[in-house]
């Protein structure tokens, strides 16, 4: 198919900070974060209507006229099917492979189901998705998109009694241990998560023991490799169950 002069988006890489807010606005899947910048991956996938323009906080996207391949609905359909197939394959090949690791983003809670109405001291759970173990989570899991992320060391929920209400409410949880788990694999997983999702905030909650500080370093190094510049809030829990920092 011959090229034609038509309207199509252009991304100013100097303005783009790789936040990824434009990606979910493109129903055709024409945009991806590549090396920390938004990229138009194929001219055929862009319809030139510019739904992504209003999502860019830095004004890095504009509509121009240039020579490009025509918009191809069939190619878009095949591309979206391929992406869906890849995501499903990725989920099936995650470590463990058991049915219990299947992604769930819709955990429903009925008020009062965990305690009689007369007992107001029983805490309600705040977990909204599954799985939570970083090794089992797909980098493209739905609960990671447009999320406030809580990255917790394994031991924290055991040491801090009010973990759900204080930290977990309205956050997407990832859990890992920088001492016992595969840190290199975690680094690669976090890089993919930061590259492929819009993350609004990151909170790291860890124990006061020295080895646990590796969790914060891991998150910051993954952010740097993903080309994302955002603050990381760190909360340190003492072995006595109190907040130290």
Image (cartoon, helix red, strand yellow):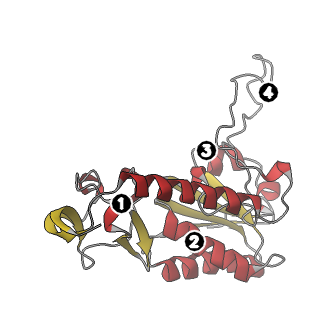
For this view, does 28 lie left or right of residue 67? right
Looking at the image, is mark 2 or mark 4 nearer the viewer? 2
Q: Which badge, 2 or 4, is on the more N-terminal residue?
A: 4
- In x, y percent, where is residue 174? 68, 60
**In the rendered view, would you say 132 is above or below 9?**
above
**In the rendered view, would you say 127 is above or below 119?**
below
Q: Nearer the viewer, residue 21 or 65?
A: 65
Q: Which badge, 4 or 1, is on the more N-terminal residue?
A: 1
Q: Which badge, 4 or 3, is on the more N-terminal residue?
A: 4
Q: Are marks 4 and 1 in contact (CB under 8 Å)?
A: no
Quadrant where the C terminus is found in the figure = bottom right
Q: Which badge, 1 or 2, is on the more N-terminal residue?
A: 1
- In x, y percent, where is residue 179? 80, 79
Classify 10 Å Cα crowding around label 1: few (below 14), some (14-19), many (20 and above). many
* Residue 60 visible in this rendered orientation of the protein: no
Classify 10 Å Cα crowding around label 2: few (below 14), some (14-19), many (20 and above). some
For this view, does 244 lie left or right of residue 229? right
C-alpha separation, residue under disc 2 versus residue under disc 4: 36 Å
Residue 45 - label = 1
- In x, y percent, where is residue 202? 53, 63
Residue carrying label 3:
169
Q: Which badge, 3 or 1, is on the more N-terminal residue?
A: 1
Q: Are marks 3 and 1 in contact (CB under 8 Å)?
A: no
Residue carrying label 4:
114
Looking at the image, is mark 3 or mark 2 nearer the viewer? 2
Residue drawn 25% across and 79% down?
14
* Residue 134 visible in this rendered orientation of the protein: yes
């Amino acid at each position: 198919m011959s090229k034609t002069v038509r309207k199509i988006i252009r991304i100013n890489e100097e303005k783009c900070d790789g936040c990824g807010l434009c990606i979910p606005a493109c129903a055709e899947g024409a945009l991806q974060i590549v090396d920390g910048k938004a990229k138009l991956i194929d001219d055929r996938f862009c319809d030139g209507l510019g739904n992504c323009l209003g999502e860019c906080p830095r004004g890095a996207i504009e509509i121009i006229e240039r020579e490009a391949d025509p918009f191809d609905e069939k190619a878009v359909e095949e591309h979206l099917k391929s992406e869906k197939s890849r995501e499903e394959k990725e989920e099936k090949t995650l470590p463990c492979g058991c049915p219990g690791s299947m992604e769930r983003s819709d955990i429903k809670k009925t008020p009062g189901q965990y305690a009689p109405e007369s007992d107001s001291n029983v805490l309600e759970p705040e977990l909204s998705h599954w799985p939570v173990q970083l090794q089992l989570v797909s980098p493209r899991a739905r609960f990671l998109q447009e999320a406030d992320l809580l990255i917790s060391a394994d031991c924290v929920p055991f040491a801090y009694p009010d973990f759900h209400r204080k930290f977990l409410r309205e956050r997407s949880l990832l859990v890992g241990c920088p001492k016992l788990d595969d840190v290199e694999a975690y680094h690669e997983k976090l890089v993919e998560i930061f590259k492929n999702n819009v993350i609004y905030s990151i909170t790291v909650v860890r124990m006061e023991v020295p080895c646990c500080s590796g969790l914060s370093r891991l998150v910051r190094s993954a952010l740097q490799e993903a080309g994302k510049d955002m603050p990381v809030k760190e909360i340190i829990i003492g072995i006595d169950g109190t907040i130290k920092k």
